[in-house]
Amino acid sequence: MKALRKLADGEGHVELVEVATPSPGPGQVLLKVKSVGICGTDLHIWEGRFDKVRPPVTLGHEFAGEVAGLGPEVAGWQVGQRVVSESQASSCGACVYCAEGQSNLCPERLAYGYGVDGSMAEYALVRASGLHRLPESVSFAQGAMVEPLAVAVHAVLERGVAFDQGPALVSGPGPIGLLVLLVLAQAGVPVLICGTSKDQARLDLAARLGAAATVMVDREDLGHAAREFTKGDGFAAAWECSGAGPALSAALANVRRQGSVVQVGLAGGPAKVDLDQLTLKEVVLRGAFVHNRQTWERSLALLGDGSLDLTPLISAEMPLSDWQRAFELSRDQAGIKYLLRPGE
Ligand SMILES: [Zn+2]
Ligand SMILES: [Zn+2]
């Protein structure tokens, strides 16, 4: 079968190569991959800027497909079923986090697509315990977006933030920021989303997705817009999805006293942040990292009952052989989410 693999450390070394179709071992399922999303992580691996990658490895951690084969000791699944797989390939199962159902925090956590072979291939080998049924009403393309949706659902619904206590700020209108917006808007929260003038198209899309206001921070004064939007009170909560230090400073500055800020974006290194706002206003600052099994169930429920529609975020679906063009379009931010269709 064809697989898109990172063959060595450093810049590039990503190639579509022929590999043997794997066969499922105990507890494993073979999936025919119908749709797989390209993520910032994949781009960083391509560019040689992601040190957790263990080449040679097949890329791809956001995917949906059909059960194509069952390993020994797998019960409850049948060939032909439509499924999504959690992106976590393994965790230790013994640490305090695993015991509490928070395996996203397990120090031994490995994910498909950089720690373990992923899904940018005609077939992918996954753990049966990470599978979820994809509702008939949800396309494979939307199924491939459950992973980034779950990142947003975890950040909004599972980090102990009283998200429905007033207007919210979302900074960074990339795929995750737009998904955070969708989850908040679906819950009836008025959202102001901000980016830069480079994000014009993404902010226009945000307005169509339900943002009550959009701000380009290099053209408008965010503080002024925030005061107007919140009638002077400040935001009840903010989700910082860009990973930029100034964006975190702006979130701290524009939430109300004892408001919450959730840092979702990764900065990739130290960032300069005005911490005085944190102290003076007693702001609660939290991180949010990926998701757990219950997050996937929640996310699929939101898609299955029609509460959320992710299709406006899908820029194009392309064959696996066009991966390079799809990666380039993703890198150039010429859209939101590009999907590959390997198993056709
Ligand atoms: Zn991703
Ligand atoms: Zn663990």
Image (cartoon, rainbow, N blue to C red):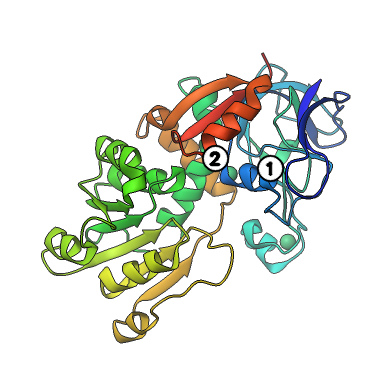
> Which residue in the protein does label 1 denote?
46
Mark 1 beta carbon near ligand 1 (under 8 Å): no
Picture residue at 36% right of the left edge, 71% below the top? 249
Assess disc 2: are there few (<14), some (14-19) or many (≥20) residues with their C-alpha within 10 Å of its C-alpha.
some
The image quadrant that residue 96 belongs to is: bottom right
Q: What residue type is labelled 1?
A: Trp
Residue 154 vs residue 178: left or right? right
Query: Earlier along the polypeptide chain: callout 1 or callout 2?
Result: 1
> Looking at the image, is 253 positioned above or below residue 206?
below
- Distance CA(mark 1)–CA(mark 2): 10 Å
Is there CB contact under 8 Å for labels 1 and 2? yes
Q: Where is residue 84 in the image (x, y as percent from the top left)?
A: 61, 32
- For label 1, the crowd category at 10 Å Cα-Cα, with few meaning under 14, some 14 to 19 and many 20 or more, is many
* Residue 51 visible to an observer of this rendering: yes
Q: Residue at x 27, y 38 (%)?
A: 204
In what quadrant of the picture does the C terminus appear? top right
**Quick one: which residue is furthest to the top in this view?**
344
Q: Mark 2 near ligand 1 (CB under 8 Å)?
A: no
Left or right position of 230 against 123: left
Query: Label for residue 331?
Result: 2
Q: Position of residue 167 (x, y in %)?
A: 22, 58
Q: Position of residue 248 (x, y in %)?
A: 39, 67
**Quadrant in the picture for residue 166:** bottom left
